[in-house]
Image (spheres, grey):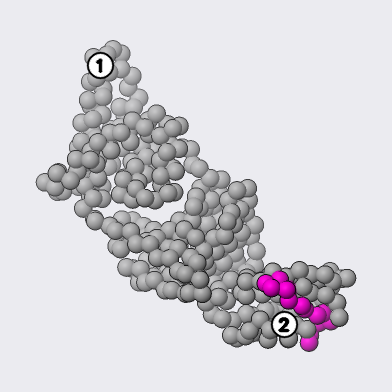
Amino acid sequence: MKESFTEEEYLRIIIRHQDDPENDVLQAEVTHLRATSPDFELLYLQVNGIWQVSGSAATLQHIDSEQAVKRFSNRLSFTSHEHPKSVNSGWKWLMRVAAILLLGVAGYVIYYAATNVTYITTATQTATIETVELPDGSKVTLNSNSTLRYPDKLTGDTREVYLLHGTAFFDVARNTEKPFIVNIGNSTVTVLGTSFNIEVSGDIIELNVETGRVEFEAREGGEKMILNAGSGLLYNTAQQATRTFASANRNSSSWLSGTLRFKDAPLSDVFESIENHFGVTIEVMLDDSLSSYNKLNASFDDSTLQEVLDVLTELYPIQVTQQDSTLIVRDK
């Protein structure tokens, strides 16, 4: 988690949390900062007080919120270096900060409150695929057992949504002035306009880029990576470890297209794609390593698991038996 913030960044975190109190990621960040930063705790308490009374302050909506925040940040940066020399001067110092808050933060708080953004949560059931169209024209297709949280209107300088669980394919409408941000736990994917697939499973985040390029950031490790079309990464949130790969044979969006395509694919990649696409586990019990077998060039369009296995057993000296959801691969 990022440890160094400006006053304006503190303020934005607090306002986002107040505007979206049910967001577990924001709640965890605010709780951590309140426990570790006295400056943040003081600002939080002051803004929280203003937030509580903002409903009766509609007459202040003419305040220029952006300029107010800039003035507030500049003044707070200046006053934070002043040290009260007595109880009386300490009170004056606090009153000055409070006055800055009332003039600067109130406009910013009311600006956010006036947008009336409502967050919508869409969750898919087993064997169900659903497409959500966002206010900016972007489309998000959710695989089964997946959950997406998004605002009913996209305000501000960015377009932000939250993939809480499962797998989603994003086809993002291009807008160079408002980056599109997908929040996944303590990580983010930022784009201007592109298409990509994200899968969240336990501690593992898998990102595959189909078109354009995206920026992946792991907030806790402070790591940023740029990925181009045809590439992807795996990020382990528990170990804060990242591995990149060429995504040509991973078939990450086959759940959406129904197609498995392989180009010079080693059998290890083929088996992994079959596992992900059909929801099975493959146990390999071969005398030789998978790398010793010829690479596969093939395309399967809306094929069943048995149809795919029939092709593989014709092309390779292997036999496959199935026990429930486990496939066992042996030599012929």
Q: Is residue 57 above or below residue 177?
A: above
Q: Quadrant of residue 83?
A: top left
Asked whether 323 falls inside the magenta stretch, the response is yes
Count of numbered tags: 2
Q: Quadrant of residue 274?
A: bottom right
> Which of these two is toward me, 325 or 23?
325
Give the alpha-carbon distance from disc 1 to disc 2, as whole Å. Answer: 80 Å
Amino acid type for the residue under numbered disc 2: Leu
Disc 1 or 2, which lies upstream in sequence? Answer: 1
Asked whether 296 falls inside the magenta stretch, the response is no
- Which residue lies at the image location 83% right of the left edge and 75% below the top edge? 330
Query: Pointer 2: residues within 10 angstroms few (<14), some, or many (20+)?
Result: some
Amino acid type for the residue under numbered disc 1: Ser
Q: Position of residue 247 (x, y in %)?
A: 62, 69
Which residue has dot 2 on it? 309
Residue occupying the far top of the picture: 86
- Which residue lies at the image location 62% right of the left edge and 80% below the top edge? 260
Q: Position of residue 55 (x, y in %)?
A: 17, 46
Instruction: Assign the C terminus to one quadrant of the image.
Output: bottom right
Q: Is residue 241 above or below residue 87?
A: below
Q: Position of residue 60 (x, y in %)?
A: 14, 45
- Magenta residues (range): 314-327
Which residue has dot 1 on it? 89
Q: Position of residue 12 (x, y in %)?
A: 34, 45
Say which of marks 1 and 2 sits in front: 2
